[in-house]
Amino acid sequence: MDSYKFPRQKSLYDNFPFTRDLLLSMLETAYSVNPPFTGYLKFTGDDCIHFLLFFNGTPYAASRFADSKPVAYTIQELGRYLAKYADGFMSVSLCETDPVLMKSLLLFLQEEPAVKAPPSLLDFENILRQIGEVGAHAMIALCCDKKTNFFFFKDGKGTLAYYADLAFKRPEGMTIDEEMLLYAFQPGADVQAYIFRDMNTHMAEDSSQLDKDSLYRLLTVGYLQDRRKADREKSPMPDKNPEGRPEIEPEKSSKPLVVEFEEPVKTPPLKPKLPSVVLSVESGPLQGERFTVTLPCTIGRKDCDLVLDDRLVSRRHAKLKIVEHKLVIEDLASTNGTKVNDKTVTTKQLIPKDLISIGSTKLRVSRT
């Protein structure tokens, strides 16, 4: 049934028959491990794979892969699918990954590649030379016999390879570039290459409202239901009947807010939680400090939301804000400039782990 293969590192649960109790155990694992869980839940059935991807303990995005095509969709769409088809035969896995493999998987499942073609039609040596000259990050996926392998390039150099094709014998003494070319041009193999130059991935818009309890409900019932404070003080999970299935509470006359897809929500939405981001100070006068800031946020030496006691920082130095659901930093015409990952920027989209340099202060970005 699981005909498509993707690289994986540590399987916490491996292709177990889907049950709601098992799903609850997996979510408890994903939300409780230390360090925070990065990896994915994988649901497999009918020659189609559904992914729920986590980054640093938070649901990040959902995607499905079928007929050799990835499709990104919302986490609520995944919940609706699972609630409808979970009674059929389906297996589920929980796999832990490192951040680079997670990034590679997200790129492959979410983004359009810059190039997609068989290696025989590509000038691979020129492509690798361009990646090296630019000195940027890149990812190349090579697919053969429904097995997808990832090759990651950092600052223009091949650094990591992740194989789903475990039958391929990795040669010793080769660079990642040479190893990738050897795999791409195997005699008689039908290989497809996907080249990604844009490293931006996208967090699902509905992920911020999902704690463990609401995610469990979504994946088993198919929708989210807002609960009053009194409801939240009760047991977080629905009571179970003798068959082990969660009982669905009947709709009350107060008409709680229900987020569904078939019809628009008719009741006024709850006031959304303001977006925030965590900045960890890695160097400078405030080294070791950790700030959770609400967006938009100005950063500077005086009269700002985040004040840095650093003489090289301008009075109003930079601003963090959300633009089209993406975190962006903007330099506010500062004297000494703003850098992201050691490159001077005017405006720049940020992702977790990016390093912001303002004066002598370095701030590492992460989500709350």
Image: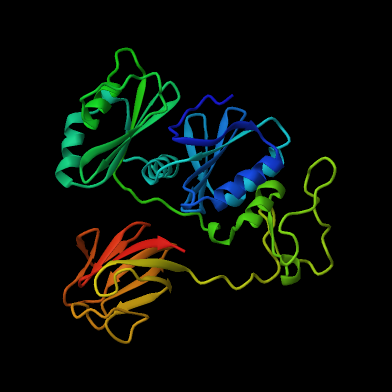
Q: Residue at x 64, y 47 (%)?
A: 79
Position of residue 125 in the picture relative to residue 2 (left or right): left
Q: In the rendered view, would you say 266 is above or below 354?
A: below
**Which residue is outermost to the bottom?**
303
Task: State the image coordinates of residue 5 (x, y, percent, origin top left).
Answer: 47, 28
Position of residue 283 in the picture relative to residue 22 (left or right): left
Q: In the rendered view, would you say 167 is above or below 342?
A: above
Q: Can the viewer see residue 123?
A: no
Numbered disc total: 0
Q: In the rendered view, would you say 85 is above or below 226?
A: above
Task: State the image coordinates of residue 117 (x, y, percent, origin top left).
Answer: 32, 29
**Quarter placement of the N terminus:** top right
Position of residue 233 in the picture relative to residue 286 (left or right): right
Q: Looking at the image, which is closer to me, 223 or 165?
A: 165
Task: State the image coordinates of residue 283 (x, y, percent, origin top left).
Answer: 25, 67
Q: How is the image coloured?
A: rainbow
Residue 354, image quadrant: bottom left
Task: State the image coordinates of residue 167 (x, y, percent, origin top left).
Answer: 39, 18
Position of residue 27 in the picture relative to residue 70 (left or right): right
Q: Residue at x 69, y 49 (%)?
A: 222
Q: Residue at x 70, y 69 (%)?
A: 267
Q: Can the viewer see residue 60?
A: yes
Q: Looking at the image, which is closer to me, 76 or 30?
A: 30
Q: Residue at x 26, y 81 (%)?
A: 309
